[in-house]
Image (cartoon, rainbow, N blue to C red):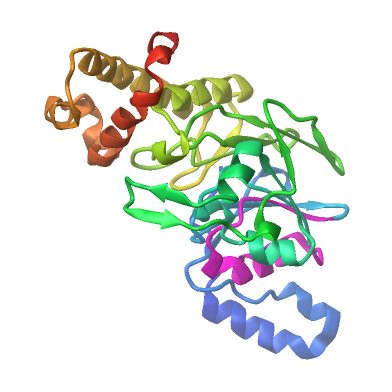
Amino acid sequence: MVDRRTVLGTGIAAAAAAAAAPFGLAGRAFAAAPAPGLMVSDLPGGLSMISGAGGAVVAARGPGGAVMVDCGQADRAEAVQALVLQKTGVKRVATLFNTCWRLEQTGGNDRLAAGGTRILAHENTRLWMGVEIPSRWEGKVYPPRAAAARPAETFYAAAPPMPLGGETIDYGYLLQAHTDGDIYVFFRKANVLVVGGAVAGKGWPVIDWSTNGWYGGMILGLATLIKLADDKTVIVPSDGALLTKADLVRQHDMHMAIMTRLQKMMESGLGTPDVLKGAPAAEYVAERGDPTQFLTLAFKSFWGNVRQFRAI
């Protein structure tokens, strides 16, 4: 069982590191504590997960350096990178996957790119990072990212597996889900599937319709992930608890029920206020919390995808 509550205590670990410093290489067994708020959990296959940096960060050791999936927010970038190097025991981050464009996943791109890290993502993620993004539902505008911070290697529908020592990394596209550039990253031998913001580990998912996320695409993404996983797969969302295949199935069933209700409401000519009054997610509120933002975003995401309704 993976324990997400593994927290490296700052005072004890820092004191141990200071005491060990005079002893040279032997002192490396006493690692400095992570920055306050960062938490480390061990995953199968020697992988590590760092939470508290925005979105979850997963790190693996490779023969040419560390491999990271997502890198958290910019203000945690230095601390996250240091912790990744500490946990993997290497001197550099060789490869970074961005599971989408959002800053919770890509805030550390600038720092890692400056150190020579190879950044991979879906082509749509690269395109979004190169333009100004007016996110109307958030009431903010995201400026274009620096050219060096954008993914240098991209793919569209599929990509060849990536060898990593004795591990194999599969990665692929999740259609229009959380955004229109979401990907999964699957460490096959470890059986760890990293899904970014395309799946909610807690509460409700965010459907970023400003960058072409849509509710039906998110449901199709869940179906793709269910086919990839088995009963022992550890599934890492951007936030919240680690998940299992059974959790994905439950979420898929829940969202199919809500999607059917929203479709009927839209086809009846109802607007967003009417949808919220109709409470199409009422039976799930006790488990997942207030659905107001989720329902608003999901319903607005329909407008560019009406023809796809009955294909879901």
In the rendered image, the quadrant that contains the N terminus is top right
Residue 55 visible (yes or no) = no
x 66%, y 38%: residue:
123
x 47%, y 39%: residue:
211
x 74%, y 49%: residue:
152
Q: Position of residue 2 (x, y in %)?
A: 56, 46
In reply to whether residue 279 is colored magenta, the answer given is no
Residue 137 in the figure: left or right of residue 39: left
Residue 141 location, quadrant: bottom left
Q: Position of residue 160 (x, y in %)?
A: 80, 30
Residue 22 location, quadrant: bottom right
In the image, 129 versus 115, the foreground residue is 129
Residue 67 in the figure: left or right of residue 70: right
Q: Which residues are magenta?
A: 65-92
Residue 186 to residue 2: above or below: above
Q: Position of residue 242 (x, y in %)?
A: 50, 42
Residue 264 visible (yes or no) = yes
In reply to whether residue 70 is colored magenta, the answer given is yes
In the rendered image, the quadrant that contains the C terminus is top left
In the image, 268 versus 42, the foreground residue is 268
Residue 143 in the figure: left or right of residue 259: right
Residue 285 to residue 16: above or below: above
